[in-house]
Image: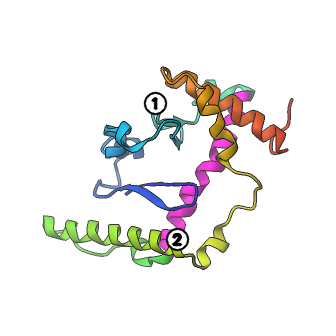
Amino acid sequence: MQVICDVDKRIISIHVGCPGSCADSSVFKRMQVYKDPQQHFSPGEYLLADSAYGLSKFCIPAFKAPAANSAENTAFNYCLAKSRVRNEHCIGILKGRWASLREMRQPIRRAKDMQILVDWVIACCVLHNMLAQIGDTWEEMFREKEKGGVDDINGCVERANQDSAVTFRETLRKTTIETNIARGILYEE
């Protein structure tokens, strides 16, 4: 299962049904959000991803080595990881609410059995979003203690050259580092 969530840990897209041996980036390429990004993203919207994913205007991955070894790229990767942890929290909350998702013991002998599992996972995700919307105790347990958020970084989108994903990531990196230095999360060297 591939889960994409928003900053409030609400699930905005999922893909269910690939075997566990599939790489996350391969599963992502099967999702509609990847196949038709213009349908799913407004100007200035993008996903944050780990370095296994490909760079595009809509998916900003962490820098890989050797580029990751520069001080600026290391700082950007650190900030990116702090934001991406929300996805891990979202999945943790989902599995905490619906323990059946931790280990599904439904034997799969025919296509209908698989469809039952897919429907079950989707139902759990819908209920997760409903509970997130009305509020429950999970929110207090997993609320980030850091001040600020990604909202300050969204202003850099207008300054980015939308013709190039590389240029966009460079602009996002610079703004992220400046914002986090101003907040005292990162320190100038």
Q: Secondary structure at mark 2?
A: helix
Say if residue 30 shows up in the picture: yes
| Quadrant assignment, res 3 | bottom left
- Number of the label disc, if any, that sits on residue 44: none
Highlighted range, magenta: 72-96
In the rendered structure, the answer to whether residue 117 lies left or right of residue 183 reads left
Q: Is residue 94 magenta?
A: yes
In the rendered structure, the answer to whether residue 77 lies left or right of residue 116 reads right
Amino acid type shown at disc 1: Ser
Question: Which of 107 and 57 lies nearest the eye of the viewer?
Answer: 57
Q: Position of residue 175 (x, y in %)?
A: 70, 32
Q: Residue at x 53, y 76 (%)?
A: 134
Say if residue 65 shows up in the picture: no
Label 2: which residue?
132
**Mark 2 nearby-residue class (10 Å; few <14, some 14–19, many ≥20):** some
Figure check: 167 above or below 136: above
Amino acid type shown at disc 2: Ala
Q: Position of residue 179 (x, y in %)?
A: 76, 38
Label 1: which residue?
56
Q: Residue at x 59, y 56 (%)?
A: 86
**Mark-to-mark CA distance, 2 and 1:** 30 Å
